[in-house]
Amino acid sequence: ALNSLTLPMVQAIAQHLKEWEESHLCNVVILRSNSEKAFCAGGDVVQVSQAWKSGARADAIKFFQEEYRLNHHIASYSKPIVAMIGGYTMGGGVGLSVHAPFRVATESSIFAMPETKIGFFPDVGATFFLSRLDGETGTYLGMTGQQLRGRDLLYAGIATHYVPSERIPNLEERLWELGTSDYDVVNSAIEEFAAQPEDSTSLDYSLSTLRNSIDRCFRFKSVESIIEALKHEEENPEWAQQTIKMLEMMSPSSLKLTLEQLGHGKRLDIKQAFELELRLAEKRLASHDMHEGIDALLVRKTKDPKWDPPTAAEVNMNQLFTEYFESTVVYRPDFVRNGVTFTEYPHKFGLPTEADVRALISGENPQAGDYMLTREEVLNYFEREYIGKIGVSQKVSWVLGCKTRMKDDSEALEWIS
């Protein structure tokens, strides 16, 4: 259902990508769905779980091994890939799209990494990409499985462009006609079809009023501390209580594993991230919670998993760390482009990140010149650098409102968090 990703699908996509990369007739690769409802709503974990429980454990591991191999190939591909992420884009579907240099969201796009709900952890490179989102956004999304919709994906950094679905056929035709693999040309072509927000003075982003609360509550290194912070959150108390309820539904061991995983992710390159995830997937397949979560939510559909341990306090963190992060590595992804790795994505066609804005204001960006910049000067800088890209002024204005203040007796800005 909803383009659930199976091993034969992974292998077919991988084979096509290999052929197109070698073909002189192919300049740009478009990844799209044949469904209006979903790009891909995730991997077929029911099949994987059944294989493991039936004793075909090598087959279960092989799914993740080849999936992560494909994800890395997309991340390191030598030609432009444009992922059209309309509809449900979750789990394995995120892995097929988020590592591409161009990710086009529409009003129908629904993003989520809901793995903690089934006793697993956010994988397909989430170790890398979630840990590099603004502030603690990635930790929040990875632990709660919270959905983002439409323009949310653009402002969060999941998508690089927002194009209304009615324009997608014309955009695809335009890309087919380009006759070049020049990334800047591809970017300009997509920008031709991007849509201005209906209200250019405000930010159409569901997390915009929550970001400071998210950073405050999800900055801690233990699940217990995060929940305690949520209990005392005063700026958005209703959201905090709803978030606690969400976390209480998830596998406690998955939550602790995810938090530790994303902390590691900030220090890992892209290859190391996938290598870690394969290690974690192998260990998780041997756990109770993964199979219980899949069975309760996707097989029985009773939504009443019996987690073991049942609470975060009962999860032995020392034991979990030793088992998942210090045990002997048995399986490794067999990367297609084994020599390619990086600590930041090599192509940046999305909106400025919070880190980009902070670097300019603090003077870390060598192009800043006089780092005593006013709000207007910061906005003008990013408008010039991004050549009028749609969404830049809204995103930067929002970041400035959340994270800066004017210095005493001056209009110059300073970073406050």
Image (cartoon, helix red, strand yellow):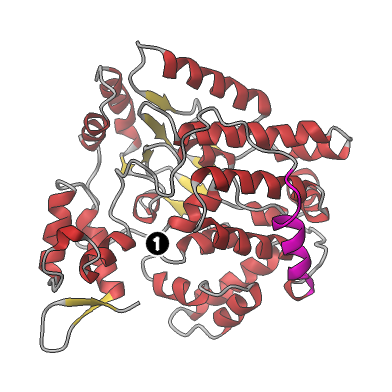
Name the amino acid, label 1. Answer: Asp
Q: Find residue 45 and report its horizontal and vertical position in percent.
A: 71, 40
Q: Can residue 136 be seen in this view?
A: yes
Give the residue at mark 1: 134
Are there few (<14), some (14-19), or many (20+) residues within 10 Å of tag 1? some
- Using the rendered view, name the quadrant where residue 250 is placed: bottom right
Q: In this view, does 80 lie to the left or right of 145?
A: left
Is 357 drawn above or below residue 346 in the view shown? Answer: below
Is 331 drawn above or below residue 212 in the view shown? Answer: above
Q: Is residue 68 left or right of residue 360?
A: right
Q: Find residue 342 and report its horizontal and vertical position in percent.
A: 43, 44
- Using the rendered view, name the quadrant where residue 28 is placed: top left
> Residue at coordinates 50% horizontally, 31% vertically from top-left?
73
Q: Is residue 103 left or right of residue 411?
A: right
User: Would you say residue 147 sits in the magenta stretch?
Assistant: no
Q: Find residue 289 and report its horizontal and vertical position in percent.
A: 79, 55
User: Would you say residue 321 sits in the magenta stretch?
Assistant: yes
Characterize the magenta stretch by its predominant secondary structure: helix
SS at mark 1 in the image: loop
Residue sitting nearer the eye, 15 or 4: 15
> Residue at coordinates 53% horizontally, 76% vertically from top-left?
240
Is 60 drawn above or below residue 137 in the view shown? Answer: above
Q: Residue furthest right?
A: 55
Q: What stretch is highlighted in magenta?
A: 314-329
Q: Find residue 264 and report its horizontal and vertical position in percent.
A: 57, 59
Give the position of the C terminus as an image quadrant.
Answer: bottom left
> Residue at coordinates 46% horizontally, 54% vertically from top-left?
148
Residue sitting nearer the eye, 301 or 105: 105
Give the position of the N terminus as an image quadrant.
Answer: top right
Q: Can residue 4 be seen in this view?
A: no
Q: Is residue 116 left or right of residue 127?
A: right
